[in-house]
Image: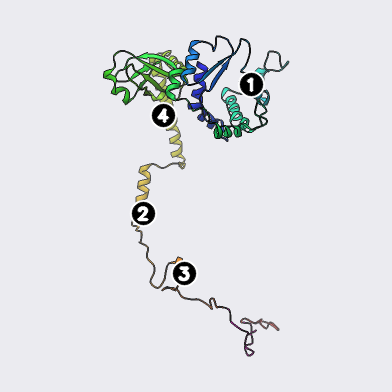
């Protein structure tokens, strides 16, 4: 259940942010619904909770006999490609089993943190895997991105799961009482106008369904109310977190003495103020130029540099015209011809008495002798 909820909250909420942070060139595959869950006969998937959740999100559950891995073509093949193409080349990877790389020091070579590793995997899944040839079952060398387009064209993909259904069937359920501040789930407050509209008509507790990987919204079910109600997180400082992340922050905050917290924060504020004053004093003493201007300084400078300045309205000078009208086909006032201008070609031949004038307008000067 936790894995299912995590997968779909990634597709629906945080995958886009991860793609942007990883620096991917392409868009990720769109989120889709669950068509079929294929698993063996073990108790991990073959139980009432998983079956009910699968049916709730309009999926199909397929069971096989025990110890018969029918998920190999779908899941393990993907992990095999990921390992052979990407993971094997990453610094610090020690192989798929103990002793696979004798003499290799994983501590010395393990220089990547989790975010860098997730970035490499994200770029592979978004920018590389969909565009390389795939020789799996029924693929026959086709590229996954083209197969996706053909599937959408001829069959259509499974629609993305409704956020309410995802939280109801795959999320974490808790009970809460509605107050004027809304409801609380796992210590986080949620409220909405729709919830307050029915508050006076509700007797008893309501069911609150949370996404463990996104604290921004919850789904609230009220007995006797036909539709689910969406609750918004009112403690905005805790938005875009997972519930375990919020609980870790709350635990760290409660673990510190409030008096010590106040003392530490006051000390930090005092040190920051002293540093700012020191840097400001140095800048004033050495007349260093700032990279910004305050509103008051800009207003005062504008009054000085624009004092007595007036903008004259535009109008054409008498006897002239707008430059954009000079080349108009029809003559207008203000245009005067300069030079011979354009003349049409002459019909017939040149008259015999019309001899071209070969006299140069500026003949070569007589430079013989001494110039004076």
* Crowd around label 3: few <14 · some 14–19 · many ≥20 (10 Å): few
Q: CA distance from mark 3 to mark 4?
A: 68 Å
Q: Which residue is mark 1?
A: 73
Of discs 4 and 1, which sits in the foreground?
1
The picture places residue 62, in percent across and down from the top left corner, at: 56, 16
Of discs 1 and 3, which sits in the foreground?
1
Q: Is residue 40 left or right of residue 319?
A: right
- For mark 4, give the secondary structure: helix
Residue 76 part of the magenta-drawn span: no
The picture places residue 291, in percent across and down from the top left corner, at: 46, 41
- For mark 1, give the secondary structure: helix
- Asked where in the image residue 223 lies, by quadrant, the reply is top left
Answer with mark 2 or mark 4, whichever residue precedes in sequence: 4
Q: CA distance from mark 1 to mark 2?
A: 76 Å
Check contact, mark 4 vs mark 1: CB within 8 A.
no
* Crowd around label 2: few <14 · some 14–19 · many ≥20 (10 Å): few
Q: Nearer the viewer, residue 330 or 371?
A: 330
Q: Which residue is mark 2?
A: 306
Q: Which residue is mark 4?
A: 273
Quadrant that contains the C terminus: bottom right
Mark number for residue 5?
none
Mark number for residue 328?
3
Of discs 3 and 2, which sits in the foreground?
3
* Crowd around label 1: few <14 · some 14–19 · many ≥20 (10 Å): few
Q: Which residues are magenta?
A: 345-360
Check contact, mark 3 vs mark 2: CB within 8 A.
no
Answer with mark 1 or mark 3, whichever residue precedes in sequence: 1
Q: Nearer the viewer, residue 36 or 17?
A: 36
Check the image and name the residue furthest to the front: 154
Check the image and name the residue furthest to the right: 102
């Amino acid at each position: 259940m936790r894995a299912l909820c995590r997968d779909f909250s990634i597709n629906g909420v945080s995958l886009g942010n991860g793609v942007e942070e990883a620096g991917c060139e392409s868009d990720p595959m769109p989120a889709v619904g669950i068509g079929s869950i294929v698993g063996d006969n073990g108790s991990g998937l073959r139980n009432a909770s998983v079956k009910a959740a699968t049916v709730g999100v309009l999926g199909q559950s397929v069971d096989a006999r025990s110890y018969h891995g029918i998920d190999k073509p779908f899941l393990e093949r993907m992990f095999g490609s990921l390992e052979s193409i990407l993971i094997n080349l990453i610094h610090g990877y020690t192989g798929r089993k103990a002793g696979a790389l004798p003499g290799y020091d994983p501590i010395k070579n393990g220089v990547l943190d989790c975010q860098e590793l997730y970035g490499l995997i994200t770029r592979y899944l978004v920018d590389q895997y969909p565009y390389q040839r795939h020789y799996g079952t029924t693929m026959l060398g086709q590229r996954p991105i083209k197969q996706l387009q053909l599937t959408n064209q001829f069959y259509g993909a499974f629609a993305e799961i409704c956020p309410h259904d995802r939280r109801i069937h795959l999320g974490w359920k808790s009970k809460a009482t509605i107050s004027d501040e809304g409801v609380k789930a796992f210590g986080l407050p949620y409220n909405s106008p729709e919830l307050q509209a029915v508050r006076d008509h509700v007797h008893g507790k309501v069911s609150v369904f949370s996404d463990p990987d996104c604290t921004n919204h919850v789904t609230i079910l009220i007995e006797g109310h036909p539709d689910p109600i969406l609750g918004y997180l009112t403690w905005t400082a805790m938005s875009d977190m997972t519930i375990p992340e919020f609980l870790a922050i709350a635990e760290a905050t409660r673990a510190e003495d409030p008096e010590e917290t106040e003392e530490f924060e006051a000390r930090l504020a005092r040190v920051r103020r002293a540093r700012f004053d020191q840097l400001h004093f140095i800048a004033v003493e050495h007349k260093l130029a700032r990279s910004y201007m305050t509103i008051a300084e800009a207003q005062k400078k504008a009054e000085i540099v624009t004092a007595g300045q007036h903008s004259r309205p535009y109008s054409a000078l008498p006897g002239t015209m707008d430059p954009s009208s000079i080349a108009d086909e029809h003559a207008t006032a203000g245009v005067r011809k300069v030079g011979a201008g354009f003349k049409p070609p002459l019909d017939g031949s040149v008259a015999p008495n019309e001899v071209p004038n070969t006299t140069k307008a500026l003949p070569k000067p007589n430079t013989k002798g001494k110039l004076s």
